[in-house]
Image: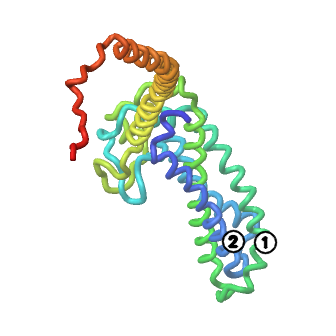
Amino acid sequence: MRSFWSDPYLWIHLSGLAAFLLFLEGCLVGFAIGDPLLPVSLELILVAIIGIAPILWMQWQRPFYIFSLVAVTVKPEKLTDDQRRLLSLFKQPRNRILALIVPVVLVVVLRQVYGIAPIAAATLPFSPTWRPLGLMVAALSFLACNLFVQVPVSVASVMLTSESAFATTSPFPPEQIQQSFTLIGLRLNQIVPPIAPLLQRSDSSTERLETTQSPPAKTNATPTSEASADVLGEDLWQEATPSTTDEATSDRAHATAESPPSSPDSTSVSEPEQP
């Protein structure tokens, strides 16, 4: 895992791709409202221009500022060096090329949605004269489709950067962020807490755990050797004990043999009384 993948804003905006299908359904509903007023090609071009042009211009000139959520954004001066390196990667030419490729793919998808729209027309309670409203709904939904595809694609492109290339990237100057990126919403010092310190604490805890677990493997052998020495000492003691006992017995017998016999006076003998 690359170090800059720990930035939560990358994953938040990458997950925005899941909203694409929701807004694509909005395109289907919009095309199903009312009867066509213009030729098919003209209606598609109108919806495509409204949905593609603003997002394409944004990604080409001033890419979306990913350190923001809904209506709040992080102040540029509060960004870390790694986060400003990410901004430098968003300004690379490959993201501009992707910004041109994505609309082409989305237009092909939009054409397929337009073809199946009459199937949903029977389920909508709108009169045929409401076609302008339908085209407006389809255009706004397609605009959201472009936004929620363009931004995740650019995020994925940045996340595929190698660790070495990221380390050599220069941080984007904070004083130029406002002029080079699209910042929308109230500016705050922080929105989402960083998770990099948590990962570092987890790694250090793992290292400490490995360090504390490795010495017992060495010390476990010491009690075993000590126990073996104790058993060996007990065996030697048991083997030496009978000889010691025999020597003690022979010493006592020798001392008894050398001691003089006790005198008769020392022994009191009771004599029977004479009648």
Q: Position of residue 195 (x, y in %)?
A: 41, 44
- Say which residue appears at 48% left-offset and 26% top-offset: 227
- Say which residue appears at 45% left-offset and 26% top-offset: 215
Q: How many numbered discs?
A: 2
Residue 47 in view in this figure:
yes
Dot 1 falls on a residue whose secondary structure is: helix
Which amino acid, mark 1? Ile
In contact (CB < 8 Å): disc 2 and disc 1: yes
Residue 40 vs 219, above or below: the answer is below
Q: Position of residue 128 (x, y in %)?
A: 69, 85
Residue 189 vs 265, above or below: the answer is below
Residue 28 numbered tag: 2
Q: Nearer the viewer, residue 160 or 214?
A: 214
Mark 2, residues whose alpha carbon is within 10 Å: few (<14), some, or many (≥20)?
many
Q: Nearer the viewer, residue 123 or 234?
A: 234
Q: Nearer the viewer, residue 141 or 197?
A: 197
Which quadrant would the N terminus be assigned to in this image? top right
Residue 52 vs 90, above or below: the answer is below
Q: Position of residue 8 (x, y in %)?
A: 46, 47
Residue 202 numbered tag: none
